[in-house]
Image (cartoon, helix red, strand yellow):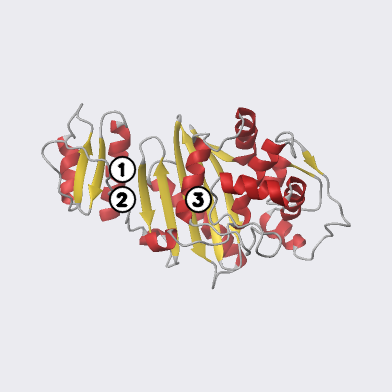
Amino acid sequence: MRWKVTCCLLLTIMVIGCSSNRTKTTGTEVEAVDDKNELPAELKAQLRAMGYTVPEKRVQRKSMNNPYENADMSHFMEGLDATFVFLDVQRDIQIVHNKQRAKTRYSPCSTFKIPNSLIALETGVMANADALVKWDKKKYPKQPFWDDLQKDFGLNWETDHTLQSAFKNSCVWCYMEIAERIGQERMQDYVKRFNFGNMDTASGKWPFWLDSSLQISALEQIAFLKRLTQQKLGLSAETYQQAMKVFEMERSGDAILYAKTGSGNHVGWFVGIVDKAGQQYVFAFNMVRAGQSPKAFARKRISIPKKILQELGIWM
């Protein structure tokens, strides 16, 4: 019930907009920022019902925490050790479930295909979303598990790929080839520019993004995705334009989902951006892999965060 009220409250704040009303909190004290308009009485009542102290008059402070930093979404998680972080980019409203896990770094796995694609486009290694990566059968021979990937998940790695189709098929050999063409020095430079997790591309086994040296937390994924949506990664306008073509996963009504899954020995990821009627939202979900069948694991890493986005009214 408390989570339902929180969702209603979030949506109310979204309707109010960022220029007129925002709420912040330190502990359980809510601070209302901007003096143009007062908080609506209904919103004040909802906040008070949730246990927050709402001042009668607006005050402004330089540093305040977010009232949704410790949201309880356990009923979505199907008993799993998981975290979900959501950020309304324009209004700077962030929701976090399981903050301790959200701060913990894990291998990014295939979510690194997002920065890898950006770097490939910016450096010219891949000219655009339709640029081709040819399958070198000697360099990347077919592996026995590829048949299961195609049968169970519809992923085809036994062919040439464009950058866009390589991303959608989560083609590991494609991105190994792309990363090799980028080169270790340039790759490390861009990963540092992006401030992507621990920024370690060299100390572990190859490929560094698969259960190796590179590690990132859900909160750090959010920070990176926020800069991507705001086009503050220091990349060209053409790179951003082509990259979003690559990252688009699906559309629903007036919303577009740009997202990537990731799977490692210990963790499953689903991270992305939702553009809904010109408003941008970013999210990061990760869950423990232990005890999950491959099919159940693959399903839950997408279905759980999608249900939360639906509850928030962001996705249909």
**Residue 163: x, y in percent?**
72, 41
Q: Which mark is residue 142?
A: none
Q: Which residue is mark 2?
A: 68
Q: Quadrant of the N terminus?
A: bottom left
Q: Is residue 54 left or right of residue 105?
A: left
**Residue 152: x, y in percent?**
68, 59
Q: Which residue is mark 1?
A: 10
> Which secondary structure, mark 3?
helix
Residue at 87 percent of width and 55 percent of height: 137
Q: Local crowd at mark 2 within 10 Å, few (<14), some, or many (≥20)?
A: some
Please tell me which residue lies in front, 195 or 144.
195
Residue at 50 percent of width and 50 percent of height: 221
Q: Which mark is residue 221?
A: 3
**Alpha carbon of mark 1 to alpha carbon of mark 3: how far?**
22 Å
Quadrant assignment, res 124: top right
Q: Is residue 216 left or right of residue 87?
A: right
Label pair 1/2, CB-CB below 8 angstroms: yes
Q: Which kind of residue does numbered mark 2 sit on?
A: Tyr
**Residue 295: x, y in percent?**
60, 63
Q: Which kind of residue does numbered mark 3 sit on?
A: Gln
**Residue 10: x, y in percent?**
31, 43
Residue at 59 percent of width and 52 percent of height: 111
**Alpha carbon of mark 2 to alpha carbon of mark 3: how far?**
18 Å
